Amino acid sequence: MFYCRANTKDNKQRILEILKQGELVSGEAISKELGISRNAVWKQVQNLKDLGYEISAETKLGYLLTSVPDFLYPFEIWPHLKTKKLGQAIYWDYELTSTNDKARELARQNALEGTLVLAETQSKGKGRRGRNWESAPAQGIYMSLILRPVAPLAKASPYTFLGAYAVLRFCLLRGLLTKVKWPNDIYVNGKKISGVLLELSATGQDISYLVLGIGLNVNQRSFPVDICATSLFLETDKTCSRNAVLTELLLYLEEGYKRLSQDTTWLIELMKEHSLLLGKEVVVSGGLELEGVAEDIASDGALLIRAKDNELVKVYAGDVSVREKNKVSNK
Ligand code: BT5
């Protein structure tokens, strides 16, 4: 489903609003309020049931909403969303191959800046370099935002940190020991909780659009054994409302995005302050092969490595692992 917040609510949304008042309400009352037939009301109620809403229908008495599904439907998000631009248009599907791929398709069709793509699960969730992102159904947040900053391509790099910024802020506010592994992984207590995938399209030397994809583990109880991952549930022992997590993230993303259009230093400083890598011996692979000490993050977002021959090397892309006493750790 693809909805814009500014558009007139459809009958399904209006019936949901009525039912959410929590009272038993007759089909006749709804049909009068909306100016549609009782049969049309019944059809929309079936529609809502298909979406996972539990609605009891008592003959002669009417409809009662008994349970709301834990899905990130646009009309469940908007009542809580405080942003002005991000998430005002939302494309939701239960399953997508990748929210980034769908967002790119919509961006090519001129979707508005701030359009948000959400899926409850992804069949081919993407990490970097063709890696996979585990997307357990309705457990995590799998989101992609279309951004259209007016900036040259050369200034695109700090936008990679925007996703990490929002997740970092969210986690720090909950007192979690959170670190960012340059450029786009967020770790809590040494385990990966979130990954960010920024994809860009250019027109000449300028950014045409960015797709900022964020995967955040929220209510997962476990992970495949081969990945060293954690979730908000595992760290806090509390099941979180994904809807509440998402709306808070969007607020931080909007605020960070606005600040980034004026200045990037604050974000680079924050990435340095909470870096998992700085000061550590690291191994860089995937393109540039290098060993050395991660010394700094440059103003253009590059990781500065002091190589063994003492040369300071700028790394713009690649996989960086910490070298721990004769072994290389994936953290
Ligand atoms: C990333 O790649 O960390 C970027 C992940 C971005 C995922 C989002 S979900 C929404 C949007 N749509 C997409 O299709 N993608 C984005 P990378 O640094 O390459 O890390 C990938 C590695 O992280 C994998 O090889 C696993 O080792 C590990 N991993 C996979 N799933 C994970 C999970 N759910 N939690 C923690 N680690 C995971």
Image (cartoon, helix red, strand yellow):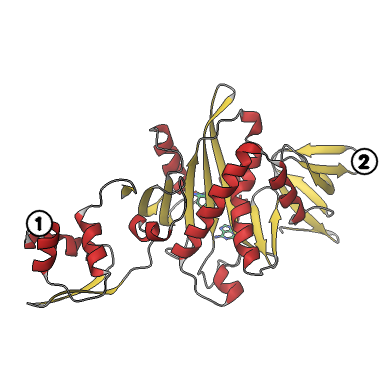
Q: Are marks 2 and 1 in contact (CB under 8 Å)?
A: no
How many neighbours does mark 2 have within 10 angstroms: few (below 14), some (14-19), or many (20 or more)?
Answer: few
Ligand 1, by image quadrant, is bottom right
Q: Position of residue 137 (x, y in %)?
A: 42, 63
Q: Amino acid at mark 1?
A: Ile
> Disc 1 marks which residue?
36
**Label located before the other in sequence (2 or 1):** 1
Tell me what residue is drawn at x 36 percent, y 52 percent: 92
Query: Residue 129's image quarter?
Result: top right
Q: Amino acid at mark 2?
A: Asn
Q: Is residue 309 left or right of residue 141?
A: right
Residue situated furthest right in the rendering: 309
Query: Residue 53's image quarter?
Result: bottom left
- Point out the image quarter for the C terminus: bottom right
Name the secondary structure under disc 2: loop
Does residue 72 appear in this view?
no
Q: Position of residue 260 (x, y in %)?
A: 62, 41
The number of numbered badges drawn on the structure is 2
Tell me what residue is drawn at x 56 percent, y 53 percent: 252
Q: Position of residue 201 (x, y in %)?
A: 52, 31
Tell me what residue is drawn at x 42 percent, y 48 percent: 117
How many neighbours does mark 1 have within 10 angstroms: few (below 14), some (14-19), or many (20 or more)?
Answer: few
**Above or below, 68 relative to 288:** below
Q: Nearer the viewer, mark 2 or mark 1?
A: 1
> Disc 2 marks which residue?
310
Q: Position of residue 143 (x, y in %)?
A: 47, 52
Q: Is residue 124 left or right of residue 59?
A: right
CA gap, disc 2 and disc 1: 76 Å
Is the shortest distance between ligand 1 and the CB of mark 1 under 8 Å?
Answer: no
**Above or below, 46 relative to 152:** below
- The one of 207 and 119 positioned closer to us in this rendering: 207
Name the secondary structure under disc 1: loop
